[in-house]
Amino acid sequence: LKKQITFVLELYTGMDKSAGADCDVAVELLVKRRDIAAADVAENEEELVAARVVVAKTRERFRAGRKDAVVLRCSVALENISAVRVAHNGSSWLLDRVIIKDAARTSSIATSTPKNKNSNTTRAATPLKSSAPASSSTAAAREFPFKNWIGRAPFCVSTQVLLRV
């Protein structure tokens, strides 16, 4: 069995008042074929899905200006993730960016918390402490910026996008 690495996947919704999404969101982490040792990979496949997670819509998720975080595990190192595919089953969503953090190499990972009804700010997040030393040779996070609509004409009529670093 391959060693599983724990990642925190952060999805940031844009600031427009109608930016939120009332839908489920699926995220796939992709890796270049040359970066994995797989004998059964077809010759024509350039990128493979290393991990997939579906984030179910709740009342508090995917709201304007919010960060939603989920944990996922896969056997591919963070530096080998070449792209992120984001899809949703709703009408439109303003996706600002996706950040993937290696939980073992990140000393503090903030999780999203519901906003206080009487305030426009998010309450302080609870940090997750890591016992692993910080590595200077490898990054603890990768950011995939987008800053655009998914599923909204004329920006992007598809409900799926592929983000690259």
Image (cartoon, grey):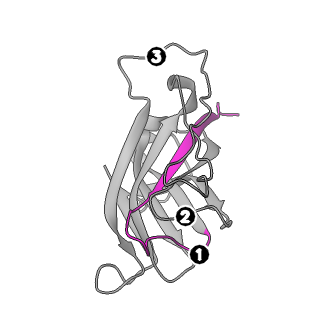
**Which residue in the structure is indicated by mark 2?**
62
Residue 130: image tag? none
Q: Residue at x 62, y 70 (%)?
A: 24
Query: Disc 3 to disc 1, how far (Cα)?
Result: 37 Å
Question: Which region is colored magenta?
Answer: 1-24
Q: Tell which circle, 3 or 1, labels the residue nearer the N-terminal end.
A: 1
Q: Tell which circle, 2 or 3, labels the residue nearer the N-terminal end.
A: 2
Task: Say whether residue 86 is magenta.
Answer: no
| Residue 107, position as x, y percentages in the image | 52, 22
Q: Are marks 3 and 1 in contact (CB under 8 Å)?
A: no
| Residue 6, position as x, y percentages in the image | 61, 35
Q: Residue at x 62, y 28 (%)?
A: 128
SS at mark 2? loop
Is 83 situated left or right of 9 in this image?
left
Q: Tell which circle, 1 or 2, labels the residue nearer the N-terminal end.
A: 1
Q: Is residue 84 above or below residue 71?
A: below
- Nearer-the-camera pick, 29 or 152: 152
SS at mark 1? loop
